[in-house]
Image (tube, rainbow, N blue to C red):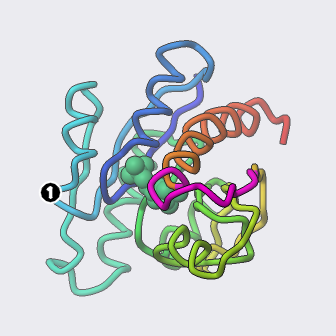
Amino acid sequence: MKRLAVFASGTGSNFEAIAQAIDEQRLNAVIECLVVDNLTALVIEKAKKRNIEVFAFDPKSYHSKNEYEKEIVSLLDRKKIDLVVLAGYMRLCGNVLLDSYEGKIVNIHPSLLPSFIGKDAIGQAIRYGVKVMGVTIHYVDSGMDSGKIIAQKSFDVKETMTHEEIEKQIHAIEHELYPETISKILEGKL
Ligand code: GRF
């Protein structure tokens, strides 16, 4: 059984979608731990309900990124993690993490990369007025949303769609595409 670590900072709807795919045997893996950089993130409760170990840390209480990433790497090593899944983790990975796990870290981003990197990608795309939007899953390197693309899925933005409807559509795509893509990676199909 392949072992996942999920990293998140917020709501955790992608965390939940991955956990559900595991429950429904669409994804043959186990979530060994959740890593969170925000002590009040809603995703923490979601992990606790599922008895998944949580490593929640406050970056401000460390002197440097190296310091907290060393703790994260020792957790990942101890748990023998096969794939690190960033799901709304709002932080760049530093050298300590990348030196040990580069090539084994994936991220999901709510735009068709390389367009609209960084925060509020959905808002950026709406303000730009694009007619096609979508989701990207990519490997993580030291840049911002810049690693090799693994999967993308797009949809046409209808004139009548509100911001809320667009967000809903993006999240619906994410919740299908992420577990499906993780499964293909773990099976060596990608
Ligand atoms: C998702 O839209 C993901 O693409 C982005 O952050 C959001 C996380 O949402 N990286 P959630 O916490 O999984 O609900």
**Which residues fall within the magenta stretch?**
154-166
Callout 1, which amino acid? Answer: Thr
Residue at x 60%, y 79% (from the top left corner): 142
Q: Position of residue 155 (x, y in %)?
A: 74, 51
Q: Is mark 1 within 8 Å of ligand 1?
A: no
When the figure is inspected, residue 61 is found, relative to residue 44, above or below; the finding is below
Q: Can I make out residue 159 in this image?
A: yes
**The N terminus, quarter of image:** top right
Residue 159 sits in quarter: bottom right
Asked if residue 188 lies in the magenta stretch, the reply is no
Asked if residue 161 lies in the magenta stretch, the reply is yes
Q: Dot 1, how many residues are within 10 Å of its Cα: few (below 14), some (14-19), or many (20+)?
A: few
Residue 116 sits in quarter: bottom right
When the figure is inspected, residue 118 is found, relative to residue 113, above or below; the finding is below
Q: Can I make out residue 136 in this image?
A: no
Residue at x 37%, y 79% (from the top left corner): 66
Judged from this view, the residue extending furthest toward the top is: 24
Residue at x 50%, y 73% (from the top left corner): 123
Q: Position of residue 161 (x, y in %)?
A: 57, 55
Residue 19 sits in quarter: top left
Q: Quadrant of ligand 1?
A: bottom left
User: Label 1: which residue?
Assistant: 40
184 and 3: which is toward the camera: 184
When the figure is inspected, residue 134 is found, relative to residue 42, above or below; the finding is below
175 and 102: which is toward the camera: 175
Whether residue 74 sits left or right of residue 104 in the image: it is left
Q: Position of residue 90 (x, y in %)?
A: 41, 69
91 and 10: which is toward the camera: 10
SS class, disc 1 = loop
Whether residue 85 sits left or right of residue 58 in the image: it is right
Judged from this view, the residue extending furthest toward the bottom is: 63
